[in-house]
Amino acid sequence: MNPDIASKVVVSPLNFHPEVRAFMKLPSEVIIHDTTLREGEQTPGVVFRPEDKIAIARMLDLVGVQQIEAGFPAASQGEREALRRLVKEGLEAKIFGFARAVKADIDEVIKCETFGLVLSFPPSDMHLKFKLRMSREEYLQRAVELVEYAKDHGLYITYSAEDSTRTDLEFLKQVFRAVIEAGCDRARIVDTLGCIHPSAMRFLVKQIREALPPGTPIEIHCHNDHGLGLANSLAAIEVGASVISSVVNGLGERAGVTPTEEVILALHNLYGIGGFRTEHLYELCKLVERISKIKVHPNKPVAGENIFAHVSGVHQHAVIVNPTTYEPYPPELVGQRRRLVIGKLSGRHAIKAKLEELGIAMDEEGLTKITEAVKSISEERKSALSDEEFLQLVNSILGSPK
Ligand code: ZN
């Protein structure tokens, strides 16, 4: 990290207070297991072609995401082609394929020669009764058989216990213990319905951690139905999970999943856990926006167009003097740009800074005229002025340059 950029990350010092840190059991490294290419495609209207998947995977790799869950090969020919091509791309990131708990799905992942398998099988009574129509005993037996089968084929296995947060806790422990004993490499706790709060998540992860052999990696996959995907993911990390499953721009089923870019930013700024090339995050989000055709909300952290746009005169003046007054981190950290919004709330300082940005020299009298004109136009039409409109106004007041 460039020290100049690092010095402009000014967050609450309490994040690093010894008493706060004493409660945490943070890993030295957090693995981001990005599932934009699998779960992201479960957003209504989003379809990725193989070349789209390759473009997104390359950007994820550039950001330093360590693992990519790239698709569900049993679903279609296109998925299989994309997975096979991605495996041969030579990325740093390890590629995973997704499978339901049936041999045929696992066979398709094996044929794609991925590094890893995400085996998804819900142990909650609700799913056992209404979806799978099987008993807990039958479930356990099938889970163990499939893990042994996949392990025989050399795959790294993440056991994804869909609907973990609504599963009987003792049964969930039993399931994870059984599959880990059968050769599974990692336990994934899944909040499929986004229906747990951070304190309960801490309790759950701690319980699972204590039930498994020491050092067993725990992954977390959180949906955002109550707006808590990121908070729950971080809560899990604080008590010993070391892998976060996430999706760029928070795409995914219903309210979506913990956003990759927000997790990386929060880990870096608030927890001091780095290792990612954050300066490419904006580019990554915009690429996924273009390909998915799902627009990033203007208020969205990292890539929203408003998050480095300063509107009020007081804020604009302060930011011109020292940006850390109203920016917790500088735009360069994520590859964004700062913007002064010129409108009714802008004062002389902001107008002067905007003129300088546009390369226009101005005396005090001109500055007063322009400031007044900006305020009255903006108030009358109830909106800010774009750079082009501002330039037109300046030219009309001063006379166009010959
Ligand atoms: Zn999901």
Image (cartoon, rainbow, N blue to C red):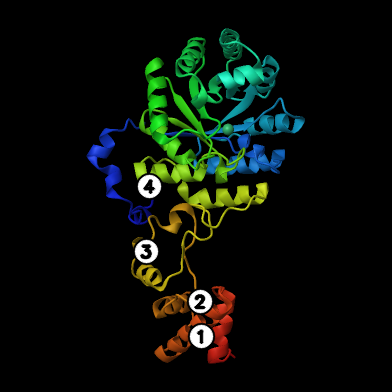
Which numbered disc, 1 or 2, marks the residue that appears first in the sequence?
2
Q: Which residue is mark 4?
A: 269
**Residue 373, which numbered label?**
1
Question: How dense is the environment of label 2, judged by Cα within 10 Å: few (below 14), some, or many (20 and up)?
Answer: few
Q: Nearer the viewer, mark 2 or mark 4?
A: 4
Location of mark 2 (residue):
358
Asked which secondary structure carries label 4, the reply is helix
User: Where residue 391 sits: x, y (%)?
Assistant: 56, 80
Whole-Å distance between the Cαs marked 2 and 4? 32 Å
* Amino acid type, label 4: Asn
Ligand 1 quadrant in view? top right
* CA gap, disc 4 and disc 3: 16 Å
Q: CA distance from mark 1 to mark 2?
A: 18 Å
Q: Earlier in the sequence, mark 2 or mark 4?
A: 4
Q: Residues within 10 Å of mark 4 (few under 14, many from 20)?
A: some
Residue 101 seen: no
Element carrying mark 1? helix
Q: Quadrant of residue 91?
A: top right
The residue under the point 38% across, 33% down is 199
- Which amino acid, by three-letter code, is at mark 2? Leu
- Find residue 402 and report its horizontal and vertical position in percent: 59, 91
